[in-house]
Image: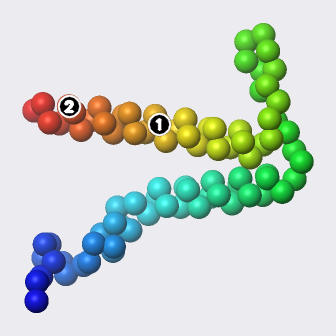
């Protein structure tokens, strides 16, 4: 029988949950907010320079989440590259 790689005896799933619990909660909150706003007919108006964009609120929530995820991914990739250069 093979032992886990770390000495604490935890399996990989438990280690994953301990490291990513905040990200999991944020994604769950996003899903709840998007579903709640998708049920209603609310629209959001966004002013960008000289134009107005109208879209369903749940689409706006998803766009903001994707922008935040891309930003976090870029920062994490840059941090990993800096650490690799050391």
Give the residue displayed 38% in from the left and 68% down from the top.
17
Compared to residue 9, the image places residue 63 above or below, namely above
Lower position in the chain sequence, tag 1 or tag 2:
1
Of the 4 image quadrants, the one containing the N terminus is bottom left
Residue 79 place in picture, x, y as percent: 27, 35
Colour option used = rainbow
Compared to residue 30, the image places residue 59 above or below, namely above
Compared to residue 86, the image places residue 47 above or below, namely above
Can you tell which of label 1 and label 2 is closer to the viewer?
A: 1
Q: Is mark 1 on a helix, strand or loop?
A: helix
Q: Is mark 2 on a helix, strand or loop?
A: helix
Residue 30 place in picture, x, y as percent: 63, 54
Give the number of the disc on residue 6: none
Q: Name the residue under label 2.
A: 82
The image quadrant of residue 10 is bottom left
Give the number of the disc on residue 70: 1
Task: Point out the residue furthest to the top here.
Answer: 50
Residue 9 place in picture, x, y as percent: 19, 81
Q: Which of 39 and 80 is in front in this view?
A: 39
Compared to residue 14, the image places residue 54 above or below, namely above
Q: Are marks 1 and 2 in contact (CB under 8 Å)?
A: no
């Amino acid at each position: 029988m093979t032992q886990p790689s770390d000495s604490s005896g935890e399996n990989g799933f438990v280690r994953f949950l301990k490291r990513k619990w905040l990200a999991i909660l944020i994604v769950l909150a996003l899903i709840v907010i998007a579903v709640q706003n998708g049920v209603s007919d609310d629209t959001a108006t966004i002013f960008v320079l000289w134009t107005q964009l109208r879209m369903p609120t749940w689409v706006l929530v998803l766009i903001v989440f994707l922008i935040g995820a891309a930003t976090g991914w870029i920062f994490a990739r840059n941090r990993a590259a800096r650490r690799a250069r050391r």
